[in-house]
Amino acid sequence: MQRIAVLGSTGSIGTSCLEVIGALPGRLSLQGVAARSSWQLLGRQCEQFAPRWAVLCDSTLRDVVPRNAFSSRTQLLFGEEGIERIASDPEVDTVVAGVVGAAGLRGTWVALEAGKRVCLANKETLVVAGSLVMDLARRRGAQLIPVDSEHSAIFQALQSGKSSEVRRIVLTASGGPFREATPEQLQQVTPEQALAHPTWNMGRKITIDSATMMNKALEIIEAKWLFGLRDDQIEVVVHPQSIVHSLVEFVDGSIIAQLSPPDMKLPIQYALTWPERIEGPSPRMDWRRRFDLQFEPPDLERFPALALGFEVAARGGTCGAVLNAANEAAVERFLARELGFCDIPRACRAVLEAHHFDPTPTLAELLRLDRWAREEIGRWKPSL
């Protein structure tokens, strides 16, 4: 029985994770849930699963939330201290890191310090502090299992050979809603259009990242650290159907791919039950239906954010933290209609080029640059 805490339980990853836990009561037990401020949904989750702890990160809700909204068997905690408690408690075996953005770094860090299995859905953790995080996991004997569909696919395919036998990995990208848009059309993209993803149902920030292909840029950086790859061993291919979730090419020319319907329950379940595979709630492929699988190279001119991912993966150091923070802040300004769609990668590049690069930063330095990059994006103005 795996005892699990889900950080970010009210988001798209978190709710899918709870579906998996609910479908496998003999294997998985929910011990803790955490959300930023969505206390009504968090309360309903506690009524259904009765976890030992629930955490609301927004401490201002302490005197607002009615206690009867939560199961009497659940202890309600507030603030980052609550996250740290459930992520480190001996009664939790596995922590699902599903908090979006750099805010998810602290919970992941604490869980790794405690030597736990971390099911990582928060790619920003490795983008910001990949070298430090992987070193911590090694020192503490912790397991870091990917949940992102692309990295889960790579993780599964890598079990077909030795790391020394890998020639390259290929991350697949849906291409988002603007895969065939002209430069003129991209200039006019609205938040509503960018939030209409053709394949996946995700949160607002991740959906915008998919539209700009910044999500794939961040995944390139994540893959480098997670799998110990050189930056020239990572490629991207556009695959609109989102059936092939990624591929590994070995030195003998063999290519191993992982296929499944575009649904997050499968990679979540695999991370929770690895190394076993068991029956679960994920949808199945219908092989009686005809369908095509399409692949095409990405257009780096149409999606300059993707080029930033390759550049940052090659350079390392402080670049990941700056790019991630700049992107998070730029997406917020785009959703607030203060920046245009094409301004997001422009602003990110400007801030990235303006920062003082350090090839071997401390965690404190990375967190300082995170704050600095957000402030710089707040001041950035598009050129007329």
Image (cartoon, rainbow, N blue to C red):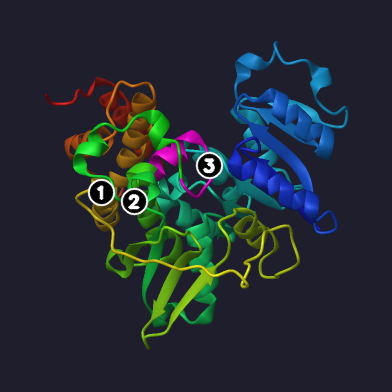
Task: Identify residue for label 1.
Answer: 308
Q: CA distance from mark 1 to mark 2?
A: 7 Å
Task: Identify residue for label 3.
Answer: 202
Q: Nearer the viewer, residue 364 or 28?
A: 28
The magenta stretch spans residue 111: no
* Secondary structure under the numbered disc 2 in the rendered image: helix
Residue 364 image offset from top left, x and y in percent: 39, 36
Which quarter of the rendered picture does the C terminus lie within? top left
Residue reaching furthest to the bottom: 252
Q: Is residue 209 left or right of residue 157?
A: left
The magenta stretch spans residue 202: yes
Task: Identify residue for label 2.
Answer: 217
Q: Please provide the residue range marked out in magenta.
A: 198-210
Q: Nearer the viewer, residue 143 or 27?
A: 27
**Residues at discs 1 and 2 in contact (Cβ within 8 Å):** yes
1 or 3: mark nearer the eye: 3
Could you tell me if residue 6 is visible in this image? Answer: yes
